[in-house]
Structure formats: structure tokens, C-alpha cells
Image (cartoon, grey):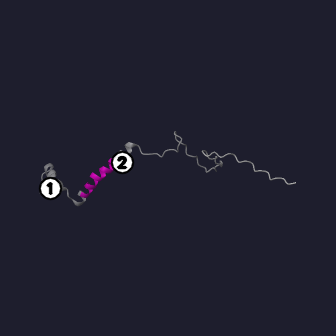
Amino acid sequence: VYAPPTPKPAAPPVNPIMPPPAPVQPQAYSGQVPQQPDQFGGKAAKKKLPTWAVVVIVAAVILVVLCVIPFIIIDATNQWCNLFGNIFNGLMPGACPL
């Protein structure tokens, strides 16, 4: 007597729109507390400088470039009387020889 092979059980139907869920694997404890998501459900945002701090930093850089560096150059080359002789002589006559 011949017995036909038993058919394989039918696989569950595959939904083309949603893939099957991935198996969940437990994560190993790393000793660190995971970062909490922000209020919108995404990852926590990186901290940025406030706007006023950015403005202060930009103003300080402009001040250094336009004021401090020329002051150092004028002082190092001793050009005070050449550039501002009339002003110094007006404040204190004879300060700079003309």
C-alpha cells in the first residue's frame, strides 16, 4: 500500500505592506542609563549656545580684530606720533615733535 507524502503546513500569508516584526532581543546592561527621548519622541537634542551668547562671542571677535590687533601693531612699531601727532600735541603741546 502506497501512502502519499503529507503536504507541508501552509505558511502564513505574507502582507506586502507590512513586513513581519523583527524578533526582539534583550539588550545587555552596559552600566549606563540610556538617554531619555525628548518630548517629541525623538532622541534628546544636543545642547546649543543661547542666541545672546553667540552675539557676545561674535562681538568679542570683531572687537579683537578691529581694535586690539591694530593697537598692538601701532604700539610695536612705535607709530603713535606719526598717526596721532596732532591729537597728542593738542592735548599736551610738544608731546610729539613735528
Crowding at dot 1, Cα within 10 Å, few <14 / some 14-19 / many 20+, comes out as: some
Is residue 67 in sight in this rendering? no
Would residue 75 appear left or right of 24 to someone viewing this image?
Answer: left
Q: Which mark is residue 96?
A: 1
Query: In whole angstroms, how far apart are the C-alphas of marks 2 and 1?
Result: 38 Å
Split into 4 quadrants, where in the image is the N terminus?
bottom right
Image location (x, y in percent) of residue 48:
44, 45
> Residue 13, located in which quarter of the rendered image?
top right
Image location (x, y in percent) of residue 97:
13, 57
Residue 55 covered by magenta stretch? no
Magenta-tinted stretch: 56-73
Give the SS element for disc 2: helix
Would residue 38 appear left or right of 68 to someone viewing this image?
Answer: right
Residue at the extreme right of the image, as rendered: 1
Give the SS element for disc 1: loop
> Residue 36, located in which quarter of the rendered image?
top right
Is residue 65 in sight in this rendering? yes
Give the amino acid type for the residue marked by disc 2 in the picture: Ile
Mark 2 vs mark 1: give the one in front.
2
Q: Which mark is residue 57?
A: 2
Split into 4 quadrants, where in the image is the C terminus?
bottom left
Image location (x, y in percent) of residue 37:
54, 42
Give the amino acid type for the residue marked by disc 1 in the picture: Cys
